[in-house]
Image (tube, helix red, strand yellow):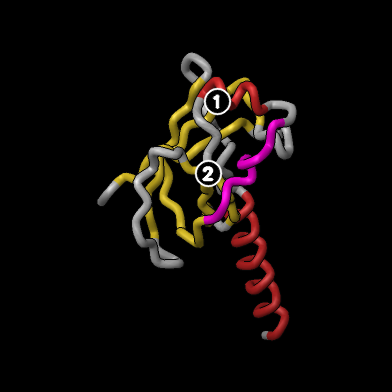
């Protein structure tokens, strides 16, 4: 009986881990049109903070400056059990959010512009919240 329980337990844990690893990340499955991709996602809000780009003028910043003003703020959120900290458009209408609140965001990704603090992921910026 104990062996049966252990086998069932291991099967369930393995299935859950496999399912969790198959969830898309924010930068997965991006489809660009004219170098831009729009993605609408539901996230769990955590906090608002200062943009890591604020005050940077190194490699990659000139490409970002061509696309948009340098963002002043960023949003920290959870998407598919993974944390992200993404810049907010300076035009993004901020409101009072509750930590843990589920919100839908529209994010734009730029195909040939990389985040200047890691140069791995495409530059992305949150442009609006979709109201329910």
| Residue stretch in magenta | 49-57
Residue drawn where x is 58% and y is 44% of the image: 25
Question: Which residue carries the number 1 mark?
Answer: 110
Residue 120 image position (x, y, % from top left): 71, 34
Which of the 4 quarters of the picture holds residue 1? bottom right
> Along the line of sight, which residue is nearer the eye, 54 or 64?
54
Residue drawn where x is 55% and y is 55% of the image: 49
- Mark 1–mark 2 distance (CA, rounded to whole Å): 19 Å
Question: Which residue carries the number 2 mark?
Answer: 72
All told, the count of numbered labels is 2
Residue drawn where x is 41% and y is 50% of the image: 42
SS at mark 1 in the image: strand
- From the viewer's perspective, is 103 left or right of 108? left
Q: Is residue 103 magenta?
A: no
Residue 107 image position (x, y, % from top left): 46, 37
Which residue is outermost to the left?
132
SS at mark 2 in the image: loop
Residue drawn where x is 70% and y is 85% of the image: 2
Residue 56 image position (x, y, % from top left): 68, 37
């Amino acid at each position: 009986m104990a062996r049966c329980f252990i086998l069932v337990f291991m099967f369930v844990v393995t299935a859950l881990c496999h399912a969790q690893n198959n969830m898309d990340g924010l930068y997965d499955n991006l489809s660009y049109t004219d170098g831009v991709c729009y993605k609408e996602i539901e996230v769990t809000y955590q906090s608002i903070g200062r943009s890591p780009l604020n005050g940077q003028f190194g490699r990659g910043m000139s490409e970002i400056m061509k696309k948009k003003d340098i963002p002043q703020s960023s949003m920290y959120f959870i998407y598919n059990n993974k944390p992200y900290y993404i810049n907010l458009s300076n035009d993004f209408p901020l409101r009072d959010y509750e930590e843990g609140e589920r919100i839908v965001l529209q994010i734009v990704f730029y195909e040939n512009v990389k985040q200047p603090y890691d140069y791995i992921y495409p530059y992305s910026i949150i442009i609006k919240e979709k109201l329910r």
